[in-house]
Image (cartoon, grey):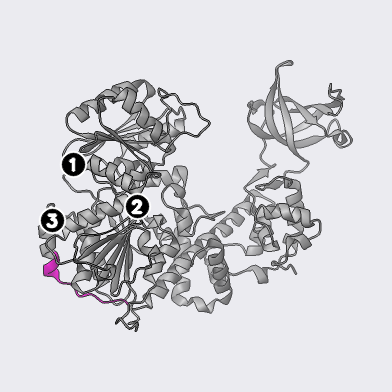
């Protein structure tokens, strides 16, 4: 029987030297080796006719050897073998370098399967093939990620015998009812077929099983966390409907139906003894802040405190200013804490723990501030906080007095994101959260006009932007980088400029010399950022050149132009976030996407932005085209190491979640092997 936890150094054919190389691939024990999946497969049962070969492309062909002979090379150390191969559609010249032994293997009249890249012989004017692999049989071979000093042949050689020694009774962790209901093969079979499948069908069933495992364990983890949280007690807050009605009436705008629905879902959660654990998801400008503020108002009215976390100082300061305005007629003490300053809106407040509402960045966690009656935690853009950061405050019980006795209550938890995530994906990513969605924008908002700008139209667009500014409006210019690398040559007229620093210099000196232009990026000190943002907000700047630091939450109603340089460097969801920085006032707003890329795929992505202002539609397109990494911080979700599963596979996502729900409902403790696997999975995924 195979010991999965033994060092690979002890296996036949692997010594200390090769073990060191395997370690670079993350392979230290046998378990790592058998779960080291191929990145792709070479299927020699699927070959291309010689007449269909295209130069500079890689293919597998099946052909007969017409002739084979060694060729003398001018370089004494190099041996060359030349052969002509033929199938029913044509002929191709094949060349092998430094493999003289092949003359004893390859014979005229034999038929072989060869994989390789197609080239062109200019002298003889015919196609050539330089083989990377040869096989006699129509087999499927694994292709693994490699490191220096390791070959595909070596990995295949050491993995294959270990698979033969596997015991399914030791490996299998899925309950029989799940295997049968989902029509999955056992884990031993899946591992054997993922490495060395006998057919395309075997490979498909192996992928299906291993992908299901990843999604199932992820869903199980989140749902078990949710169940654990529901076993805790939270402060059941009383709802003063009159207070809430008066607050809504005091607003200078009318709430949308989606805002009202989401607010009521949250407030009902606060009224329960079970801790709220909810994600408030809404498109750019949909009005999540005021909905969260209503929750904070309920907490304050029940003599509980609220902590509101935001990922950047710019957004934190903006929340502080906006929420102070919302609560100006209410006796709510609001505090602000960031890494650069400690500030309160009321000089009488001497300590953080006396605030009804404390707004801060990550610094609020780092300072380890004591909050005596913490009843509600609000996290804005939750995927920008680590798992441990999110749980730091949430898992703290609420003390009943200054002497340290604890009530056993835990705070309610509300997280928010302005990055629209398709609902099925959101359920997979945040399976421990209930979800409220604000899927409509205020009626007074005008549709932002989005245009993809060709290089030839750049100057015309500059003139349009200058005209807008002369009408009293303002513009953003976003670049993907802060500055050029040290080795790059500076050309201020280079239209492919990707850095904010160079773009600022170009616009200031050559494009808009008469305008007031500011620059902001992540390397500036907090005070410097504050000065720039204050000047822009107070209209002392006409144009703000920035990196992605302005992606989230910046509210400048007078800004009507968003100009994005190298737009192809950003995902659709991120571009949509940038676009949401304008269109917040009464004037018509514009978003201009600049790109010098000739890629058809890039043009299609940017045209999707032009066609749609719906963040959820764009997020779905981004998910399909670029993957979930552009929508969320995968490293913060526990899904960064998915090897077989695809988050675009909504059918399997739903099946895995449904299976996990049944296990949780029947009692996870009934399945000891599954519990052990889940514990190991949590360790691998770096979840708490």
**SS at badge 2:** loop
In the picture, residue 372 is in which quadrant? bottom left
**Image spot of residue 641 (x, y percent):** 54, 56
Pointer 1 residue? 585
Q: Residue at x 69, y 42 (%)?
A: 45
**Image spot of residue 132 (x, y percent):** 73, 37
Label 2, label 1: how far apart the Cα atoms are: 23 Å
Instruction: Report crowding for label 2: few under 14, some 14 to 19, many 20 or more residues within 10 A (C-alpha).
Output: many
First in residue order: circle 1 vs circle 3? 3
Which segment is the magenta one?
234-244
Pointer 2 residue? 312
Q: Is residue 392 left or right of residue 103?
A: left
**Image spot of residue 276 (x, y percent):** 32, 70
Q: Is residue 485 left or right of residue 518?
A: right
Q: Report if the CB atoms under discs 1 and 3 are less than 8 Å apart.
A: no
* Res. 176 in view: yes
Q: Is residue 170 above or below residue 322?
A: below
Pointer 3 residue? 251
Q: Is residue 471 above or below residue 293?
A: above
**SS at badge 1:** loop
Label 1, label 3: how far apart the Cα atoms are: 17 Å
The answer to which of 184 and 233 lies nearer the viewer is 233
Residue 86: say if magenta: no
Q: Is residue 615 left or right of residue 203?
A: left
Label 2, label 3: how far apart the Cα atoms are: 26 Å
Q: Is residue 63 above or below residue 182?
A: above
The answer to which of 607 and 445 lies nearer the viewer is 445
The answer to which of 514 and 189 lies nearer the viewer is 514
Image quadrant containing the N terminus = bottom right
Q: Residue farthest to the right?
A: 104
In the picture, residue 179 is in which quadrant? bottom right
């Amino acid at each position: 029987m195979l010991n999965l936890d033994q060092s690979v150094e002890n296996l036949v054919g692997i010594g200390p030297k090769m073990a060191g190389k395997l370690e670079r691939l993350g392979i230290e024990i046998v378990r790592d080796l058998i779960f080291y999946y191929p990145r792709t497969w070479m299927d020699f049962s699927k070959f291309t006719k010689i007449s269909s070969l295209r130069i500079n492309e890689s293919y597998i062909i099946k052909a007969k050897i017409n002739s084979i002979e060694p060729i003398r090379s001018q370089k004494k150390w190099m041996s060359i073998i030349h052969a002509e191969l033929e199938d029913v559609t044509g002929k191709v010249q094949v060349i092998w370098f430094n493999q003289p032994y092949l003359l004893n293997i390859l014979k005229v009249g034999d038929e072989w399967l060869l994989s390789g890249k197609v080239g062109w012989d200019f002298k003889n004017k015919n196609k050539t093939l330089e083989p990377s692999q040869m096989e006699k049989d129509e087999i499927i071979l694994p292709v693994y990620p490699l490191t220096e000093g390791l070959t595909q042949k070596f990995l295949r050689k050491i993995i294959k015998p270990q698979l033969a020694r596997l015991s399914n009774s030791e490996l299998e962790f899925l309950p029989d009812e799940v295997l049968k209901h989902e029509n999955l093969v056992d884990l031993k079979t899946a591992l054997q077929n993922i490495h060395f499948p006998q057919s395309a069908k075997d490979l498909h069933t192996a992928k299906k099983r291993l992908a299901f495992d990843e999604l199932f364990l992820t869903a199980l983890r989140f749902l078990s966390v949710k169940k654990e949280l529901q076993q805790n007690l939270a402060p059941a807050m009383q709802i003063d409907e009159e207070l809430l009605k008066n607050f809504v009436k005091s607003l200078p705008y009318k709430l949308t139906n989606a805002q009202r629905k989401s607010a009521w879902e949250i407030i009902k959660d606060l009224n329960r003894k079970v801790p709220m654990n909810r994600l408030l998801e809404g498109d750019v400008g949909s009005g999540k802040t005021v909905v969260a503020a209503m929750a904070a108002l309920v907490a304050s009215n029940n003599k509980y405190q609220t902590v509101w976390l935001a990922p950047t100082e710019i957004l934190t300061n903006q929340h502080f200013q906006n929420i102070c305005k919302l609560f100006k007629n209410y006796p709510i003490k609001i505090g602000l804490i960031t890494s650069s300053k400690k500030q309160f809106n009321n000089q009488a407040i001497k300590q953080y723990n006396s605030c009804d509402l404390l707004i801060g960045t990550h610094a609020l966690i780092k300072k380890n501030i004591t909050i005596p009656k913490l009843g509600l935690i609000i996290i804005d853009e939750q995927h920008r906080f680590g798992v441990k950061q999110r749980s730091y405050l949430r898992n703290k019980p609420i003390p009943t007095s200054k002497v340290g006795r604890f009530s056993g209550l835990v705070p309610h938890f509300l997280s928010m994101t302005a990055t629209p995530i398709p609902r099925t994906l959101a359920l997979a990513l945040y399976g421990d959260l209930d979800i409220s969605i604000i899927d409509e924008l205020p009626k007074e908002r005008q549709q932002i006009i989005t245009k993809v700008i060709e290089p030839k139209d750049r100057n015309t667009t500059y003139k349009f932007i200058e005209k807008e500014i002369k009408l009293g409006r303002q513009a953003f210019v976003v670049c993907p980088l802060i500055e050029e690398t040290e080795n790059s040559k500076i050309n201020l007229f280079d239209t492919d400029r990707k850095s904010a620093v160079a773009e600022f210099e170009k616009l200031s000196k050559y494009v808009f010399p008469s305008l007031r232009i500011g620059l902001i990026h992540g390397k500036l000190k907090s005070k410097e950022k504050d000065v720039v943002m204050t000047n822009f907000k107070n209209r002392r700047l006409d144009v703000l050149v920035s990196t992605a630091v302005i992606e989230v939450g910046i509210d400048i109603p007078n800004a009507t132009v968003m100009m994005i340089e190298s737009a192809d460097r950003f995902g659709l969801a991120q571009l949509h976030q940038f676009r949401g920085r304008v269109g917040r006032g009464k004037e018509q707003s514009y978003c201009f996407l600049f790109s010098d890329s000739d890629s058809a795929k890039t043009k299609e992505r940017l045209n999707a932005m032009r066609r749609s202002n719906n963040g959820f539609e764009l997020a779905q397109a981004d998910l399909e085209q670029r993957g979930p990494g552009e929508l969320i911080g995968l490293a913060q979700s526990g899904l960064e190491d998915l090897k077989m599963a695809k988050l675009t596979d909504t059918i399997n996502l739903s099946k895995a979640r449904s299976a996990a729900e049944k296990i949780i409902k029947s009692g996870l403790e009934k399945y000891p092997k599954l519990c052990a696997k889940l514990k190991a999975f949590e360790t691998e995924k770096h979840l708490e």
